[in-house]
Amino acid sequence: MIAMTTTSEGAPRKFQYDDAKVADVKLPNPLKGVSDTADWPQRRAEIFAMLEDQMFGKAPTFDKASIKVTREVADKSMLDGAAILSQPILQIAGCKVQLMIVRPANISGAVPAFLGYNFRGNHTVHEDPAIALTQGWVPRTKNNTATQEQRGLSAKRWAINEITKRGYALVTVYCGDIDPDFHDKFKNGVHAAYGVPAPNQWGTIAAWAWGLSRILDYLVNEPAIDAKKVIVMGHSRLGKTSLWAGASDPRFAAVISNNSGCGGAALSKRRFGETVHRINSSFPHWFCDNFKNYNNREDKLPFDQHMLLALVAPRPLYVASAEKDLWADPHGEFLAAKGADPVYRFLGTDGLPTEDMPAIDEPVHGRIGYHIRSGKHDVTLYDWKQYLAFADKHIKKASN
Ligand code: GTR
């Protein structure tokens, strides 16, 4: 089936949803020129430089000593006493970044954590009225302003009870605190402090990823969090972000991509579902301008997304798809994980322990984890249960 739809520019486009019609794509070899593990750091740097220059854009260096931390409210008990909520505010490059940290109340030492952005404000993650209402621009709301009615709106996407019960903290931040998700030619968010980016400099996804590293700069000094065990997680556009954060910053202990699709875990060269041209037209601010050179020219890309995944190696990596999320190309997400597997194996791990795409709701949890869940584009309790089992296996039980 080929479905017709329109881009935000109004141009009608055809999108491929029939796997049988997708040509077998030839993927660049991530291990090109590598014969010994000692060769990998140089090859890794080459791959990183390609993705940075041609896709995400280079982010500025940052002096972490310039982060100022304030607290407007004291820590507070949450989840009927089972958890503690703290909400430090970080001043980063002129932006006020409000953290929401929920940690288990029964553990006094530092705990491993999941770090991930939310789409519409910390107050949407749980209905607790103590959670600060987001102050900046918010999408899909009246006057782009957060309101009390939105409390807990996205709670289903955040398994806070399960996360804290299992001995992990959740650290979440509204992505718009770092860069609001609309194209204003880079006048707002952290871009404002650095000027309009050159064609090879950071778009919004790279800015969000950079923001996650700044938050990690802070977490290193946060006694409640074991900063060596921070798992960066994101859904959809924020899954593209978690992958680039994990690729850019080796301090992230593990990386989770939930339904990240085009520009995330899905192979671009397959042109299945969302394409490079479409994503660059609908969201011209997400990637650097150089990426637009590949609009309708995916065959010319010197890399594909399996190489983004390989940049996480040998750290634990989880790629999750959803059966009905064809726009994100579940099969292409699996094939990218499979394409990263040789690097994981080369570096001495079990990689992705399956040749063939697993059946629906049958996860595999090697050093690369993968599942395709029944249902649509979303983050569900099922997804979180897999991430927790994966984190228990690869992060919690691992020694520092
Ligand atoms: C869609 C976009 C996808 C995905 C998604 C999301 O509109 O085409 O690439 O990122 O948004 O973030 O929910």
Image: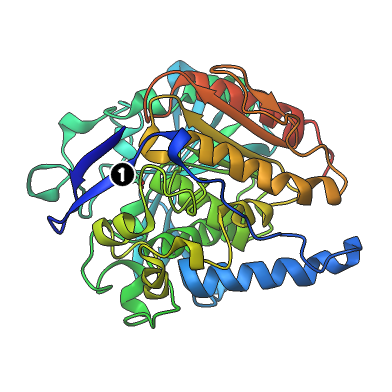
Give how far across and how far down residue 79 sits, in percent: 44, 20
Q: Is residue 172 left or right of residue 358?
A: left
Total label count? 1
Q: Is residue 58 visible?
A: no
Give how far across and how far down residue 76 sits, in percent: 43, 32
Question: Front-most of 23 and 360?
Answer: 23
Q: Taking the image as four quarters, which one is ligand 1 found in? A: top left
Display colour scheme: rainbow
Q: Is residue 395 visible?
A: yes
Depicted 34 relative to depicted 318: above or below: below
Give how far across and how far down residue 264 sits, in percent: 49, 50
The quadrant of the rendering that contains the N terminus is: top left
Q: Amino acid at mark 1?
A: Phe
Question: Front-most of 276 and 67?
Answer: 276
Name the element at disc 1: strand
Q: Toward which corner of the image does residue 146 lie, by quadrant?
A: top left
Depicted 46 relative to depicted 268: above or below: below
Residue at position x 16%, y 30% in the image: 149
Residue at position x 52%, y 75% in the image: 53
Q: Which residue is mark 1?
A: 15
| Crowd class of label 1 (few under 14; some 14 to 19; many from 20; radius 10 Å) | some
Question: Front-most of 245 and 54?
Answer: 54
The quadrant of the rendering that contains the C terminus is: top right
Q: Does mark 1 have its CB less than 8 Å from ligand 1?
A: no
Depicted 301 relative to depicted 353: above or below: below
Depicted 13 relative to depicted 38: above or below: above
Q: Toward which corner of the image does residue 165 lie, by quadrant?
A: top right
Give how far across and how far down residue 367 sits, in percent: 75, 37
